[in-house]
Amino acid sequence: MNIEKLKSYLKSKINAELDDILDQRDGQAFDSAWCQVYEVVYDVSSGFDSEALFIELSDLVSQHEIVSYIIDDLIMLDKAKEVGVSPPFVLFMRESYEKGVVPHVWQS
């Protein structure tokens, strides 16, 4: 994950744009794909330290819901890596975060 690019991305967005990202993530295709991966890795432990990153990202935006989504994504990706799960949706999520973008448009 490229944290500096992600921080720049988040700082460049206004609240309405962040709301749009959240709305798109709540759409059927994205939500369904996310939940399928989460079900597979739910019981896996994660060593991902999310607290400091949550605080750092929360300081950039006034919308903590998107930061919670990002942290949930990163924990899920860490768990998926731990067990070697890498369906196309996981690859899409990883690539998005490597580019510093919050994933939100998924077409299966």
Image (spheres, rainbow, N blue to C red):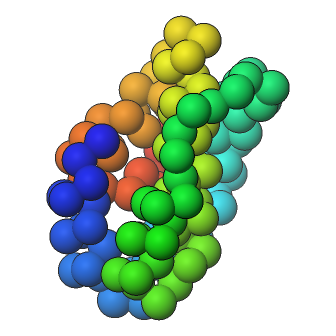
Q: Residue at x 65, y 61 (%)?
A: 26
Q: Residue at x 53, y 39 (%)?
A: 48
Count of picture labels:
0
Q: Is residue 83 left or right of residue 105?
A: right
Q: Residue at x 55, y 17 (%)?
A: 82
Residue sitting nearer the eye, 78 or 52: 52
Q: State the image coordinates of residue 10 (x, y, percent, origin top left).
A: 31, 73
The part of the image, by quadrant, that contains residue 9 is bottom left
Q: Residue at x 40, y 71 (%)?
A: 57
Residue 32 visible to an observer of this rendering: yes
Q: Is residue 91 left or right of residue 100?
A: right
Q: State the image coordinates of residue 84 (x, y, percent, origin top left).
A: 53, 10
Q: Residue lying at the far top in this picture: please name it.
A: 84
Q: State the image coordinates of residue 60 (x, y, percent, origin top left).
A: 35, 81
Q: Is residue 51 left or right of residue 35?
A: left
Residue sitting nearer the eye, 83 or 16: 83
Q: Is residue 19 left or right of residue 45?
A: left
- Quarter of the N terminus within the rendering: top left
Is residue 17 positioned above or below 73 on the image? below
Is residue 40 positioned above or below 74 on the image? above
Residue 36 visible to an observer of this rendering: no
The part of the image, by quadrant, that contains residue 68 is bottom right
Q: State the image coordinates of residue 38 (x, y, percent, origin top left).
A: 71, 34
